[in-house]
Amino acid sequence: MTSMKRRIFLKGSLATGALGATIGTGLLTPRAALAAWSKEAFESKDINSALSNLLGSSDLAASDKIKIKAPDIAENGAVVPISVSTTIAGAESISILVEKNQLPLAANFVLGANTLGDVSTRIKMGKTSSVVAVVKAGGKLHSTGKEVKVTIGGCGG
């Protein structure tokens, strides 16, 4: 039992030391270590204002090059697994929005150059709603959606 606690302590100490050394040498700055996020977008009350605050526009074009994998029925809205993939060339970001949530922007992933457009996460859904995936590529917004039925709400309802 004591050796297990010692191992955990040593692993934690090593990880903390490595992170400190990386930041100390300038390879990783504290600003880069913390993800930047748009407070206004995540606090927006509707999809259009969330998209405008996050991506600068809310003009969406439907696309068959975006696929959403989500359950048809989510028994627990607190934990709904969602996967979004795209074959759109030059995808810059993938955003996931839930139309009827009080705060519709659930997630935003910024993709690096030559990154495969494929993300997975778990989101909260308050009630049955359309889940919308938005891909930004070449300055344009492409989207697709899927209806997900929720039997037990996960946003306090």
Image: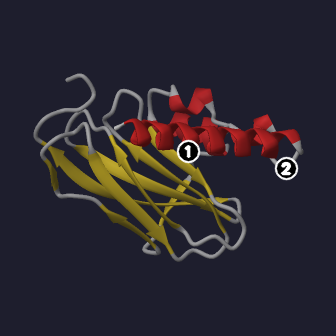
- Residue 100 lies in quadrant: top left
Residue 19 drawn at (x, y percent)? 72, 42
The quadrant the C terminus occupies is top left
Mark 1 — residue?
Answer: 11
Position of 148 with respect to 116 (left or right) is: left
Q: From mark 1 to mark 2, how far is it between C-alphas?
A: 22 Å
Q: Residue at x 44, y 32 (%)?
A: 46
Name, please, the residue furthest toward the top.
156
Residue at image location 56% in from the left, 52% down from the top: 109
Percent coordinates x, y for residue 35 in the rendering: 65, 40
Give the label on residue 117, or none: none
Of residues 155 and 128, which is closer to you in this image? 155
User: What's the residue type where badge 1 is placed?
Assistant: Lys
Task: Give the residue drawn at x 63%, y 70%.
Answer: 115
Residue under the image location 49 percent in, 38 percent down: 6
Q: Residue 53 placed where, x, y %? A: 62, 35
Q: Quadrant of residue 75?
A: top left
Q: Which one is earlier in the sequence, the residue at label 1 or at label 2?
A: 1
- Above or below residue 95? Residue 3 is above
Residue, far front: 2
Q: Amino acid at mark 2?
A: Leu
- Looking at the image, residue 147 sits to the left or right of residue 36; the answer is left
Front-most of residues 6 and 78: 6
Q: Look at mark 2 in the image and give the residue it sits on.
A: 27
